[in-house]
Image (spheres, grey):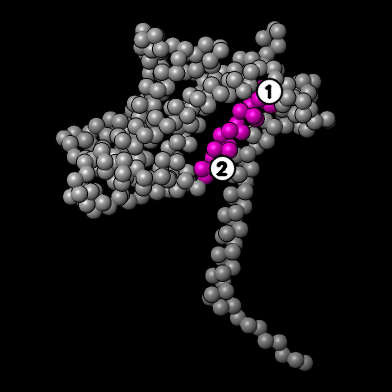
Amino acid sequence: MTATTVTPKTPASGARVRVRASRLVLYTVLVVITGLMLGPFGWLVITGLKTTPELAASPVHWLPDKIQWHNFADAFTQIDFLGYARNSLIISLIYATLVTLSSAWVGFGFARLSAPGKKVLFGVLIGSMMLPQMITLFPTYLIFAKLGMVDTYWPWVLWGLSAAPYLVFLFRQFFAGMPRELEEAAIVDGCGYTGIFWRIFLPQSWPVLTASFVIAFTWSWGDFIAPMLLLSSDRTTLSVALMTSYVTPSGLPVNNLLAAGSVMYVVPILLIFLVAQRGFVAGMSTSGLK
């Protein structure tokens, strides 16, 4: 008989096995979480491809017997989809651009300037994030009504110029980690703090600028209450039109058209995120690190 030699496992091979097993578990968990996150969107797409009787069937009709592609065309033509989308795009671009710049300016002041009570003021600013939008929306509406700004884009201009606490926090954290030598060298060359911000700090903060713009654009694009209160039916946004237009003569919602329109409503946000994905991820990962 020939003796069989058994090669003992080395510590290195055992460590590699443990690493592979841990990675397998991690990837499995990530796949499950991704499926849970994409599940509602997938169900929305399936709903948009069903007929009305299939939506009302009991038990639940999981998949359509025949895919109704015309639901997307009907959802697009039943309302002025492009007109409402244009209104949403204009409002979102105005707000996202202005609030990104104003938040960057305020964050720069908190990060690089010294003043009495700065920490207290920053704490009050961060604490304001806990206030629900509904608390401030009604008084804001009364102010805009008194100023004659209802049914105009001026409210979003003013909201954009007033900065956003969360975005201020992102910029403050990013600017606080930049080297002091850059600022000191610019001051020696005769540059003021305004020039330091526009010429040195702002060009270096493109990851946070991208993240801030994507976040602010998503806020404005998905807002329903403010456009509902401040804009007329002709100038309202796509989010309001989706919730109020796909109804039967008796006032009941047409859910398959609503689902199809909602899928098309989400597409611009997905495209913006895919285009700006690298900057968005970099901005969210570096804004809290020094």
Identify the image quadrant of the N terminus: bottom right
On the image, which quarter does residue 254 sit in?
top right
- How would you classify the magenta stretch by its main secondary structure? helix
Which residue is drawn at the image coordinates 72% and 90% (left, top)? 3
Q: Would you call the spot at circle 1 few (<14 residues within 10 Å), some (14-19), or many (20 or more)? A: some
Q: Which residues are magenta?
A: 258-277
Q: Is residue 162 above or below residue 178?
A: above
Looking at this view, is 289 or 216 the one in front? 216
Residue lying furthest bottom in this view?
1
Which residue is drawn at the image coordinates 27% and 34% (left, top)? 122
Mark identifier at residue 76: 1
Element type where label 2 sits in the image: helix
Query: Gap in Å between the C-alphas at discs 2 and 1?
Result: 24 Å
**Pointer 2 or 1: first along the chain:** 1
Element type where label 1 sits in the image: helix
Q: Is residue 266 magenta?
A: yes
Q: Which residue is mark 2?
A: 274
Residue 30: percent from the left, percent from the top? 58, 49
Residue 126: percent from the left, percent from the top? 32, 33
Asked whether the viewer can see residue 174, the reply is yes
Residue 106: percent from the left, percent from the top? 30, 34
Q: Is residue 152 above or below residue 215?
A: above
Q: Amino acid at mark 1?
A: Phe
Left or right: where does residue 39 sit relative to residue 273? right
Which residue is drawn at the image coordinates 83% and 30% (left, top)? 66
On the image, which quarter does residue 67 sit in?
top right
Left or right: where does residue 194 sit relative to residue 288? left
